[in-house]
Image: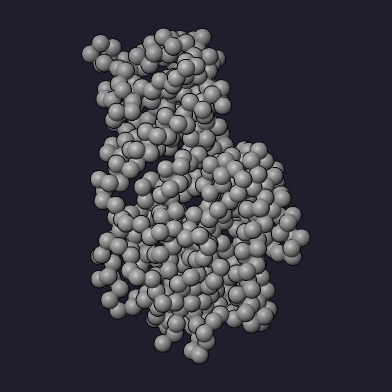
Amino acid sequence: MLRQGMIGGLMALGLASAPAFGEGATTGERAERPRILSMQERAEQRDAWLAERLDALIPTLMRERGIDMWIMVAREYNEDPVVETMLPARWISARRRTILVFHDDGKRVERLTVARYPMGELFPSAWVPEEQPDQWARLAEIIAERDPETIGLNTSSLEALADGMSHTQYTELVEALPKKYNKRVVSAEALALDWLETRVPSEMAVYPGVVRIAHDIIDEAFSSRVIEPGVTTADDVRWWMRDKVNALGMKVWFHPSVQIQRPNQYTPTGSGQSLPSGDVIQPGDLLWVDFGITYLGLNTDTQQHAYVLKPGETEAPKGLRDGLAALNRTTDHLTDSFEVGLTSNEVLGKAREAALADGLRPSFYSHGIGYHGHGGGSPIGWWDDQGTDHPQGMRKMRADTAWSIELNTTVTVPEWDGQDVEFRAEEDAYFDGETVRYLDGRQTKLHLITSD
């Protein structure tokens, strides 16, 4: 059960004023609170970004990876994850079978679609069915005319986002090719991930505001505006967040998690430290949220903590505050380890060595973010695997990439009878090749929720 009147307040397209408690839980360089754009404005923004990205990134990335022709095939409602990011904003999905072709002749990269329709103004159509009824035959003609040395297809045994070519489409494409081109087909895994993870300056001018929206929703959710101790459950807060995002005309990319940690009470599953989400929030509880929104085609991913004040308290117990401080030190060890050219496995190894030397008990599992919540690029650790030899950790770190800095550290809390408490952080950041900066600051203080 939520605070009286909260649901009605969700209908306004804007965020409520910041709550009295919890203000300042996110600190550092903050983004300006953005105006929520209309659907038409959102489409115009996304299309402008796409045009810039295609012109600025594709030639450099294809040449870096040595791919002369990049071919992607998608069918309506079964889109390749990369193709989805190249669709005009008004398209929503591919149409019938949509084939995208990029060809680099050494001077410029030609873009076209082998489809009945042009794909907006960015991909002119190169197929007239009345002249050549067979779509695959027309693609084969285009390939033969340009005679590329390497043909990249989105296939990968490791990376789902780079494995968008379905079995049927792959088989039919290869069968349609003149035989001499079969040996020229290579995986475009690295190129696909490059495209997905690389951010351009115009996106980064807006991305911090997207994260600000997510932070503001957490600020309100973790406040006495929403939570009434002794009445509100963790599930109530989760669904309030879903309704809030929906009222803003946005989406979540996963159902929010809101969990309770409490002295001397455990669950037998998961980390062993969180109570069921149907439990009522009580004074003295430590709350945790994992929350991500999608807006303008960009995703956020945030984890923060709140403390429910007991009557007469004005701050959280020192052990909990110290736990959050330890969590931020753990985060610093990770971001200090970022270096272009290192593999993510090597970054993980450096971060773990530094954190352990600092007396911390860390677990790292950070990931790229952008077009997808769990975005392109190599994760830095996995929650269930802290080894530095993971096959997905062999990709090298690149500049101009956005990251969810995600990790946890376990801290013994004296005020909770020496109980071990797991503190979890996740904040979105940008790596420019030299430094890591948070898009909208990070949590350095616990959200505080009053008990009436």
Q: At 29% from the left edge and 52% from the top edge, which residue is drawn?
A: 37
Quadrant where the C terminus lies? Answer: bottom left
Q: Quadrant of residue 450?
A: bottom left
Give x and y (percent) for residue 410.
Answer: 65, 67
In this picture, residue 281 sits left or right of residue 380: left
Q: At 46% from the left edge and 40% from the top edge, which residue is drawn?
A: 200
Q: Is residue 220 above or below residue 150?
A: below
Q: Is residue 405 visible?
A: yes
User: For this rendering, which residue is in front, 111 or 414?
Assistant: 111
Q: At 64% from the left edge and 40% from the top edge, which residue is drawn?
A: 340
Quadrant where the N terminus lies? Answer: bottom left
In this picture, residue 303 sits left or right of residue 116: right
Q: Quadrant of residue 93?
A: top left
Give x and y (percent) for residue 160.
Answer: 50, 39
Colour style of the rendered protein structure: one colour
Q: Is residue 121 above or below residue 243?
A: above
Q: At 33% from the left edge and 28% from the top edge, which residue is drawn?
A: 122
Q: Is residue 385 visible?
A: no
Furthest toward the left, the residue is: 130
Give x and y (percent) for residue 17.
Answer: 35, 70
Give x and y (percent) for residue 76.
Answer: 32, 33
User: For this rendering, which residue is in front, 372 or 44?
Assistant: 44
In this picture, residue 351 sits left or right of residue 308: right
Q: Is residue 165 above or below residue 409?
A: above
- Count how many numbered circles sit on residues in the image: 0
User: For this rendering, which residue is in front, 414 or 78?
Assistant: 414
